[in-house]
Image (cartoon, helix red, strand yellow):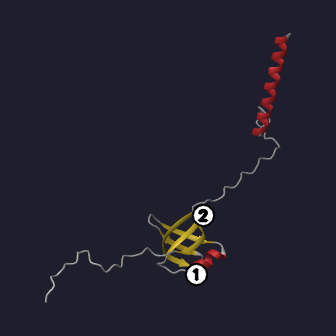
Amino acid sequence: MKNILRLVLVSLVTLAFAGVALAQTGTTGSTGTKSTVPAKPAAEKKAKTMRATGELTSADAKAGMAKVKTKDKELSLSAETEDAKESLGKVKVGDMVQVAYTEKDGKLTLKSLKKTKTPAKSTSTKSDKPMESKPATK
């Protein structure tokens, strides 16, 4: 009698888990028809903000377009917010800029742009040759 009770209990537990698994997949069993339970919408991925520094090669504040040449590549950015478009009007071609942007579906969207200091160029007037000493004359 104990063995029969165990067999029935194991069978019931197995059927209960199978029912829960079928309910989660959205099918009603072997017929393959869809359940009326609505599927949960997929959560949108938040776009990751990336940063780059480079030379501004073109800028159009009205159209909201900019191109920045970094060490590795050239970025073609489009500004969608008014703040980003205003920042395009404050810089000129040839300026060193730092940009923050996002990428979605292959499109680069400008979030912010600011002018950075240009790399310091060596303006030293000293010669590489050591200075020669001349004997003093009387």
* Of the pair 13 and 29, the residue shown nearer to us: 13
Q: Residue at x 49, y 79 (%)?
A: 93
Residue farthest to the left, as pictured: 138
Q: Position of residue 99 (x, y in %)?
A: 55, 69
Q: Which residue is painted at 59% across and 71% down in the image?
A: 78
Q: Can you give x and y, in whole percent of width and height, for residue 57 in the image?
A: 48, 75
Three-letter amino acid code of the residue under disc 1: Gly
Q: Quadrant of residue 64?
A: bottom right
- Indicate the secondary structure of the residue bearing disc 2: strand
Which is more N-terminal, label 2 or label 1?
Answer: 1
User: What percent of the width, then of the height, locates residue 61?
Assistant: 59, 79
**Which residue occupies 19% across, 79% down?**
133
Q: Residue furthest bottom?
A: 138
Q: Quadrant of the N terminus?
A: top right
Task: Residue under label 1, please give it.
Answer: 89
Q: Which secondary structure lies at badge 1?
A: helix
Which part of the image, by quadrant, shows the C terminus? Answer: bottom left
The alpha-carbon separation of the residues under discs 1 and 2 comes to 20 Å
Residue denoted by label 2: 102
Locate residue 55 relative to residue 138 in the image: left or right.
Answer: right
Q: Residue at x 15, y 82 (%)?
A: 135
